[in-house]
Amino acid sequence: MGAEQSDTAAKVTDMKWVNTGLMMSGLVAMTMSVGAIAATQTKAIALPRSLAATDTVHAPTVATAAPTVISQGSVAVDYRVPALQRDFTGSLWISTWRGQIARINPETGVVQAQITMPDRTTSALAQDRVGRIWVGTSSGLVRVDPRSNQVTASNFALPSSRVLSLLIDTRGFLWVGTDQGLAMVSPDQGLLMTTLRGLSGVSANVMELDNNGHLWVGTLNGLTQVNTASGAEMRVVRNIPGDIVQALTRDAQGNLWVGTPAGLFVVTPDNGQLVRRVGAMVGQNVLSLAMDANQAMWVGTESGLVTLNPYNGEIFGEVLGLPGRQTLAISPETGNKVWVGTREGLGWVSTSTGRGVPHIGYSNPGAL
């Protein structure tokens, strides 16, 4: 980076916000039974940097809420929760590395359903327009009917069986990101509409839509913009520090916030220009991002969860008390809480106190 660029990066906290087919032969039917900044730029949720001594651990209120660990031979239990998905009914779906996904009541934490997956590891969740839940696993794509809590289809005919990300576009099509490219599936017909195996950057780690309905894909080497109508690449952005895009979200102005192992950055989708480096996050390994209704940015990193003011880059505070510091997924405004998936399990944050609380049924007991 040149001297001029370094000087700009150093001053970023003072900058103002910049406005600037797969036929059904590949879809194998199966049944598996299962046991405030918005009003002003200065108002925001302030989070304390320490927990009060009276904090309690959140515990489900019914016996069925504690999940049974699925035996995988001698494989040690992995408590990570890499994906969260709020559904149309208000319930929260969580993915795990314990051979199951689950649906919980986000107000109480009570587990409403546990659904066994054909693969031990799940990494992505999405809800289609009729409410079906799609699950990305290490061995393909799974469809779940939330009315019966059953797996109704499993799909392996993708660019790769390792699914990393899922997204429903503005037309209702399901985009499936794998470690070897992209696929677009019609959820209703079970047909593969488009496959992009030669994706620049190879791995579709994360995805987000811009204001024009085009797809932005975070890869191993920056960002790639894809036309959702044709499936063709439109633009490749390679000048993002840290290279590997691990987190991606869009703000109210339509700009893309990009998390990499080197920090947090902002790209304008109109021309793909890197317009900002968030100074307070330089050197932080950013793993997850979410913008809440007050336009506060929640940033999950390798070492913890923080909130910041997106207009000036000021960090409001760090959330303590979650089951783990490595923050993998964030779901704001879910049951009047911010639900968080970490390496050591599931937790939630009170937006009034800023305190993190583990969910006992889906957290590592050794981390509590």
Image: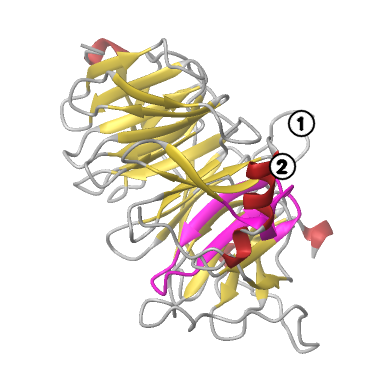
Q: Amino acid at mark 1?
A: Val
In this rendering, the answer to whether 132 lies above or below 358 is: above
Could you tell whether 119 is left or right of 368 in the image? left
Display coloring: secondary structure
Label 2: which secondary element: loop
Q: Is 363 in front, or is 63?
A: 363
- Write down the residue under mark 2: 78
Name which residue type carries label 2. Asp
Callout 2 environment at 10 Å: few (<14), some (14 to 19), or many (20+)?
Answer: some
Is there CB contact under 8 Å for labels 2 and 1?
A: yes
Q: Is residue 169 left or right of residue 114?
A: left
Residue 158: in magenta span: no
Where residue 155 sits, quadrant-wise, is: top left
Q: Nearer the viewer, residue 321 or 61?
A: 321
Any magenta on residue 283?
Answer: yes
Q: Quadrant of the N terminus?
A: top right
Q: Can residue 118 be seen by looking at this rendering?
A: no
x 48%, y 58%: residue: 290
Residue 114 appears anywhere in the view: yes
In front of the other: 352 or 247: 247
> What is the x, y in percent for residue 243?
61, 30
Q: What stretch of residues is rendered in magenta?
A: 277-304
* Residue 221, image x, y percentages: 56, 24
Which disc number belongs to residue 75? 1
Is 153 situated above or below 26?
below
Between the residue at mark 2 and the residue at mark 1, the CA separation in whole angstroms equals: 9 Å
